[in-house]
Image: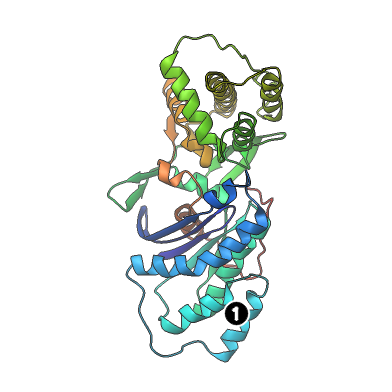
Amino acid sequence: MIILGIETSCDETAICLIEAKDNSVKILGNQLYSQVALHAQYGGVFPMMAKREHGKNLTPLLEKCLEEANVLKQNKKTNVSKEKNTKLKQILIREEGLFEPLIELAKKIEKPKIDAIAVTNGPGLEPALWVGVSFAKALSALWDIPVIPTNHMEGHIMVAPLKKTSDKEYEMTDIQFPAIALLISGGHTQLVLIKDNLNYEIVGNTKDDAIGEAFDKVARILGLPYPGGPQISKLAEKERIEFPNKIPPFPLPRPMIHSHDLNFSFSGIKTAVLYTVQKIDKLTDTMKQEIAREFEDAVVEVIVKKTKEAVEQYGAQTIIMGGGVSANKKIRNDFTKLAEDLNIKFLVPEISASTDNAFMIALAGYINIKAGKKPETEFKAKGNLSL
């Protein structure tokens, strides 16, 4: 089965074409455009700007993806009827920059061999999500291909068990259930109990800021560029290497670490960093490094303890980690050790598949189709969509 994945939940525009059969997956084409540099000058993602960029980039990325997959066949005849032209215009009426380039592409190429389209319909920034959803519906109308609306967070879960067998080929390894998934990103910090395949229950959630959001806000307080997570981690690692046994000069709280539940809160630690910095006359590079390490240590200590409690409470046999923050080196190392201590499996995607991408969406679409999920036509983008 050949699945086209479309991802526009935040500031990454992504298109991926996969071929999946049983437990094997092959990437045929994979294209991604990151808007990070554009949003960095404003210190964060602007939803309407992200929406506009998605509209500008989706069709060129689709063309590149089809070309990479060697399924782009030129067609000298115009193959878009007036009826389809009108329908596409209606579907894309609110999506700036999408209709004209898509029609031009459709006129010059043959319908590619695609069995289904999987598109992120939430959670995420709703204006950004709508661009991808509308694009998927337009392609469905153009080429008569069914569409599977796909949960972004489920995509992060699905990509974790993959084992790479060659440059673009993967095998889906078995998950031992029950499993606990820790989803950590700019918009989410969740503990999810997975009782069986596609059977989810959220057992822990953030009460305020998500972990990635906290990283970015603390980076801003320290005067570090956006996105802040990698900057914090870089300084923290440098501090650990240079001063492995140093007592932190700026101790920070471990929020909700003794709350006797599986929820999180990161707003307070962000505020603690702010108050700490406000008491310092001149914030030096050394101080930034010390605060970055203490902040990262505190946050990681909390998520490790909460995940351990979830594993013990539900008798989990596997820990799954996903989301952009799962690329963090210390988090990966500490969770590898946790799984070893608990003698259970730990599954985390390769770094390139940790951040938002269309590969995970195409994969999640395929797994849902295998499980019997039916295509939809009248679905909407939902910014607060839950698992």
Q: Position of residue 83 (x, y in %)?
A: 59, 89
Nearest the viewer among 275 and 7 is 275
Going by the image, does 117 lie left or right of 168?
Answer: right
Mark 1 Cα within 10 Å, few/some/many (few <14, many 20+)? many
Q: State how the image is colored.
A: rainbow
Q: Quadrant of residue 63?
A: bottom left
Residue 181 appears in the picture as rendered = no
Residue depicted at x 61% and y 14%: 250
Q: Position of residue 382 (x, y in %)?
A: 68, 56
Name the residue tied to disc 1.
88
**Position of 298 relative to 105 (above/below):** above
Question: In the rendered image, is residue 143 in sight?
Answer: yes
- Taking depth in this image into account, of 303 and 248 the one nearest to the observer is 248
Front residue of 181 and 51: 51
Q: Position of residue 246 (x, y in %)?
A: 49, 9
Q: Residue drawn 53% across and 21% down? A: 293
Q: Amino acid at mark 1?
A: Leu
Q: Position of residue 122 (x, y in %)?
A: 63, 54
| Left or right, 157 with reference to 49 | left
Q: Is residue 7 above or below residue 134?
A: above
Residue 133 position (above or below residue 163): below
Residue situated in front as seen by the camera: 353 or 178 = 353
| Above or below 271: residue 119 | below
